[in-house]
Image: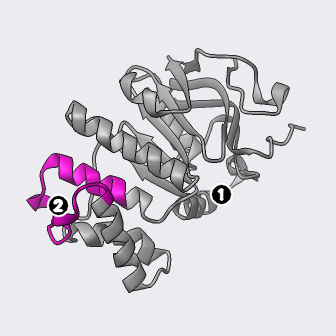
Amino acid sequence: MSAAPPDNDVLWARGIVKSHHGTPALRGVSLGVREGEVLAVTGTRGSGKSTLLGCLSARLPVDEGEVWFNGTPVHTLTPARRERLRLQHFGHVGSEPHLVPELTARENVALPLLLAGTGRRAAYTAAAEWLDRLDVADCAALRPAELRQNQRQRVAVARALAPLPPVVLADDPGAPLHRDEREQVLRILASAARSHRLTLVLATHDPEPAGQADRTLTLVDGLLTAAPAAPSETGSTAVSAAR
């Protein structure tokens, strides 16, 4: 019988293995992430970063191993329960914004709040506040097709943060932005996570954004290169590449 995850780890994984169409993406990854921690996962394209975020967020089932969220064994949940968990407790922003084209920027940001049952006025107030924080308040009434690429990405970040989910998974969110804009958006992400005690896991192939993180790990061919100790050995936030 496996040991329970540490109490102060909001996310915890042990020995997770995941393949795509027979090609290994993760080859035995173990890690723990504290509540409120900003963790960066770096690595080249194809190293397994997106797959790791998918497994941690309950979007992808693991082939082997364990994934826990706040004491819930994600790896044992049915697909329907995984999806419900993901929608209720995880925010996500990727390298492409994937905004709803028929909705304005304000409506896009308010949408997850409205779907969660937040009142219309409160949802739109929160949306306006986050658009202002991301410096795109003047885009509130515009639809995605009317926005520049960097504006669409900022709206997507605002949408991920507006519901204040316990965990935000950011998969190379600065990829479509110029360097200065990328650094600003990543600072806002990290600052929002710390000020609201959200857990942020940032995946990036660029080592520079990792400077915003409390801790940085590196994936190489589906294995974590930093291996202080396995979670089960320390009972804390240690990270290992388990084989």
What residue type is disc 1 on? Thr
Element class at badge 2: helix
Element class at badge 1: loop
Q: Position of residue 217 (x, y in %)?
A: 55, 23
Q: Position of residue 116 (x, y in %)?
A: 49, 75
Q: Examine the rendering and report whether any part of residue 50 can be seen.
A: no
Residue 218 as seen in the image, left or right of residue 73: left
Residue 136 shown in magenta: yes
The C terminus lies in which quarter of the figure? top right
Q: Which residue is mark 2?
A: 144
**Residue 89 location, quadrant:** bottom right
What residue type is disc 2 on? Pro
Q: Which residue is mark 1?
A: 78
First reached walking from the N terminus: tag 2 or tag 1: 1
User: Residue at image x 57%, y 41%?
Assistant: 55
Q: Position of residue 44 (x, y in %)?
A: 39, 20
The N terminus lies in which quarter of the figure? top right
User: Residue at image x 63%, y 62%?
Assistant: 81
Disc 2 crowd, CA 10 A, few/some/many (<14, 14-19, 20+): many
Q: Main secondary structure of the magenta part?
A: helix
